[in-house]
């Protein structure tokens, strides 16, 4: 990856470091986790697929499947930190089941219907097959790219 593209992808991390995460609202989150092999602190910015005020709880997609470094790191060392907007919390992590994940993806596509062709193109590239947005496609998608929820540890269940 060339230097300019790498800088562009890292820009949101710097916004969080400069305490300007509020500029990204609830659209992105900063995941702070521990490297499973190195033990070093890592930071990853992820797009929020769904934001739930209660908790709060946020849902993200592992765009590179179950082998994503950040996902493998939080499985090895649970309780990552999450920063979303100006809110920071230690998180409880859970993987959404198929039914809930399909519902969340349908809502995401509905909320982003104006950019749906771009979303489908990007998902098709990540998946390696033509994603059309049907219910069957969503079931196949969530089997391949898991949806992960982060909830504040000190939150109470409604």
Image (spheres, rainbow, N blue to C red):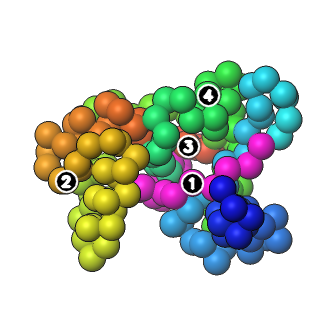
Q: Where in the figure is residue 13, as x and y percent of width and height?
A: 73, 62
Residue at the image position 60 percent from the left and 72 percent from the top: 24
Compare marks 2 and 4 and give the one earlier in the sequence. 4
Mark 3 or mark 1: which comes first in sequence?
1
- Residue beneath disc 1: 46
Q: Residue at x 57, y 71 (%)?
A: 25
Tell me the quadrant of the picture where the N terminus can be found. bottom right
User: Is 40 on the left or on the right of 60, as rendered?
Assistant: right
Instruction: Give me the C-alpha separation between circle 3 and circle 4.
Output: 18 Å
Q: CA distance from mark 2 to mark 4?
A: 27 Å
The residue carrying mark 2 is 133
Q: Earlier in the sequence, mark 2 or mark 3?
A: 2
Asked which secondary structure carries label 2, the reply is loop
Q: Earlier in the sequence, mark 3 or mark 4?
A: 4
Contact (CB < 8 A) between labels 3 and 4? no
Left-right relation of 100 to 9: left
Q: Which residues are magenta?
A: 42-57
Secondary structure state at the residue bearing disc 3: strand
Residue toward you, 1 or 83: 1
Circle 1: is it few (<14), some (14-19), or many (20+) Cα within 10 Å? some
**Real-space CA distance between mark 2 and mark 3, rounded to the nearest whole angstrom:** 27 Å
Q: Which residue is mark 4?
A: 72
């Amino acid at each position: 990856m060339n230097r300019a593209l790498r800088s562009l992808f890292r820009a949101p991390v710097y916004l969080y470091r400069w305490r300007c995460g509020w500029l990204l609202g609830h659209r992105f989150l900063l995941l702070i986790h521990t490297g499973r092999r190195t033990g070093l602190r890592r930071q990853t910015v992820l797009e929020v697929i769904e934001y739930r005020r209660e908790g709060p709880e946020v849902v993200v997609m592992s765009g590179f499947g179950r082998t994503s470094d950040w996902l493998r790191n939080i499985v090895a060392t649970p309780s990552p930190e999450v920063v979303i907007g100006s809110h920071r919390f230690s998180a409880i992590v859970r993987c959404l089941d198929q039914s809930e994940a399909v519902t969340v993806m349908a809502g995401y596509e509905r909320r982003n219907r104006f950019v749906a062709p771009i979303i489908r193109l990007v998902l098709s590239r990540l998946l390696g097959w033509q994603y059309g947005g049907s219910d069957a496609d969503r079931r196949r998608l969530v089997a391949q790219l898991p949806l992960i929820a982060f909830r504040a540890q000190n939150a109470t269940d409604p």
